[in-house]
Amino acid sequence: MSTASKASKGGRPANSSEDGFSEVERAAIKDRAVELKSAARRGRSADKAAADEKDVLAKIAEMGQPDRAVAERLHVIIREVAPELAPKLWYGQPAYARAGKVMCFFRSGQADKERYSSFGFTTEAKLDEEHGLWPTSFALTELSDKGEATIRKLLKKALA
């Protein structure tokens, strides 16, 4: 293999994020493929829901601190405020869906090699505001009482 085939234009390594997906992004895509295969095998049943929640709890248990504490607390909050949302893995991270469509999710900053984690909502959430601007994702380094109250309020609105 020649040196030219090992590197991309401009001398960057062929696996750099400038040439496509980063290592973290590729891992998330692989995780998503595994999730889809697993969901297809499980079908639609109460056993599937229990298995999906078990997968989410296992993923949370794998996280390092402080992400694990934040994700555990978020799981409890979501299950209290929105019991109709089903836990599931989404791109290798905890997410919560209604009718199979993800409405909100937690992304571990440690897993993504970022300086903070995030909690966000997809377009399935009914958070639209009249002024044309509304938050869809929040940086999380800890979950304060005020942050928890905001999440509870947003979850209620998202389900409306």
Image (cartoon, helix red, strand yellow):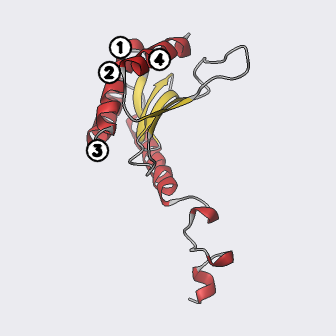
Q: CA distance from mark 3 to mark 1?
A: 24 Å
157 lies left or right of 66: right
State yes or no: discs 1 and 2 in contact (Cβ < 8 Å): yes
Q: What residue would you read off at disc 2?
A: 76
Number of residue marks = 4
Residue 150 badge: 4
x and y percentages locating residue 139 in the rendered image: 48, 34
Amino acid on which disc 4 is placed: Thr
Residue under label 1, please give it: 80
- Measure the C-alpha gap from mark 4 to mark 3: 24 Å
Please give the name of the residue rendered at 30% of the width and 43% of the height, measured from the top-left corner.
Answer: 63
Q: Which of pointers 3 and 1 lies earlier in the amino acid sequence? A: 3
Q: Quadrant of residue 2?
A: bottom right
- Using the image, determine if residue 90 lies above or below residue 155: below
**Residue depth check, mark 3 versus mark 1: number of the one nearer the observer:** 3
Q: Does label 3 or label 2 sit earlier along the sequence?
A: 3
